[in-house]
Amino acid sequence: MFKTLKIDRKNRRIMGVQFTDVKTLEKAAYAIGSNMYEGFKPTARAIRIIRDYSAGKISKQELARLAKAKAYE
């Protein structure tokens, strides 16, 4: 069953995780939604990782390392 993603555009939050701007929020929401379609179940930690990657705060290599370590759970 598909679960909806709680997005608060007015306050720039996804599942309670704060974003600095709408553009980064939308990029993250698209990435999360695409992965949810494939069975991904987002957590607040996963959303923070995706937010930081989308904002350029962590590298692609760091994102891959976190994914392999399942740090998003």
Image: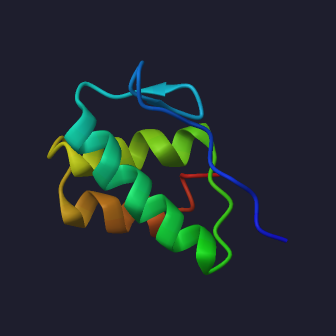
**Residue 63, horizontal then vertical, whole percent:** 32, 60
User: Is 24 situated above or below 39?
Assistant: above
**Residue 40, horizontal then vertical, whole percent:** 63, 68
In the shown orientation, is residue 12 left or right of residue 22? Answer: right
The number of callouts visible is 0
User: Is 8 situated above or below 73?
Assistant: above
Residue occupying image coordinates x 56% and y 52% = 72
- Of all residues shown, which one is farthest toward the top? 11
**Residue 39, horizontal then vertical, whole percent:** 68, 75
In the shown orientation, is residue 3 left or right of residue 5? Answer: right
- Of all residues shown, which one is farthest toward the front? 10
Closer-to-camera residue (46/13): 13
In the shown orientation, is residue 44 left or right of residue 34? Answer: right
**Res 20 → quadrant:** top left
**In which quadrant is the N terminus drawn?**
bottom right
In the shown orientation, is residue 55 left or right of residue 34? Answer: left
Closer-to-camera residue (34/67): 34
Closer-to-camera residue (46/25): 25
Residue occupying image coordinates x 26% and y 35% = 22
State the scheme by which the image is colored: rainbow
- Of all residues shown, which one is farthest toward the bottom? 38
Residue occupying image coordinates x 58% and y 38% = 44
Residue occupying image coordinates x 52% and y 63% = 33
- Of all residues shown, which one is farthest toward the right? 1
**Residue 54, horizontal then vertical, whole percent:** 24, 50
